[in-house]
Image (cartoon, helix red, strand yellow):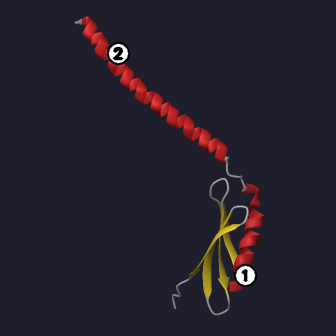
Amino acid sequence: MTRILVSVLLAGSALALNGCVASIAVSAASMAARGMAGQPKNNEGARPQAVAACSGRASPYGKVHIIDAEQHGPSKIVVWGTVDDGTRRRSFECSYGTRITGFKLRAIASHE
């Protein structure tokens, strides 16, 4: 009876360990893939460049006013601002890595 119980426990332990080994292998493969892809370049010091580039991108739409520039992750800076062409005012959101990666221009609702 004791031998049967020990055999069942050993078999159960082996199954549990097989799942654990598979999990460890997947985790190791995932870490290796991230290591080969490399870490994104940290652009924390590029805030002035981001503001300048985004201001330049927004300038064809009118006078630029920067509201904020914020670090979003190690390699992304988001710049918010407004542009005013004398007849209407619009807001913009500009994403910057090592260059502009996204630009959205939106109308600002008038409350008149």
Where is 91 relative to 86, above or below?
Answer: above
Q: Could you tell me which secondary element the residue under label 1 belongs to?
A: helix
Residue 49 at least partly seen: yes
Most extreme residue toward the left, as rendered? 1
Q: Residue at x 67, y 56 (%)?
A: 75
Give the secondary structure at mark 2: helix
Q: State the residue position of label 1.
A: 59
Q: Relative to 80, say whether 33 is above or below.
A: above
Label at residue 10: 2
Horizontal and vertical percent position of residue 63: 72, 84
Quarter-of-image position of residue 93: bottom right
**Residue at x 51%, y 32% (from the top left corner):** 25
Is 52 above or below relative to 14?
below
For residue 52, side relative to residue 77 (left or right): right
Q: Is residue 20 above or below residue 32?
A: above
Q: Which residue does the image show at 52% across and 85% down from the upper left?
A: 109
The location of residue 64, given as percent across then percent down, is: 71, 80
The earlier-in-sequence mark between 1 and 2 is 2
Q: Position of residue 3 (x, y in %)?
A: 27, 7
- Residue 23 x, y percent position in the rendering: 47, 33
Q: Quadrant of residue 33?
A: top right
Question: Visible in this render: residue 62?
Answer: no
Q: CA distance from mark 1 to mark 2?
A: 72 Å
Q: Is residue 60 left or right of residue 26?
A: right
Q: Amino acid at mark 2?
A: Leu
Q: Given contact means CB atoms under 8 Å apart, are the residues at marks 1 and 2 in contact?
A: no
Q: Quadrant of the N terminus?
A: top left
User: Which is more foreground, mark 1 or mark 2?
Assistant: 2
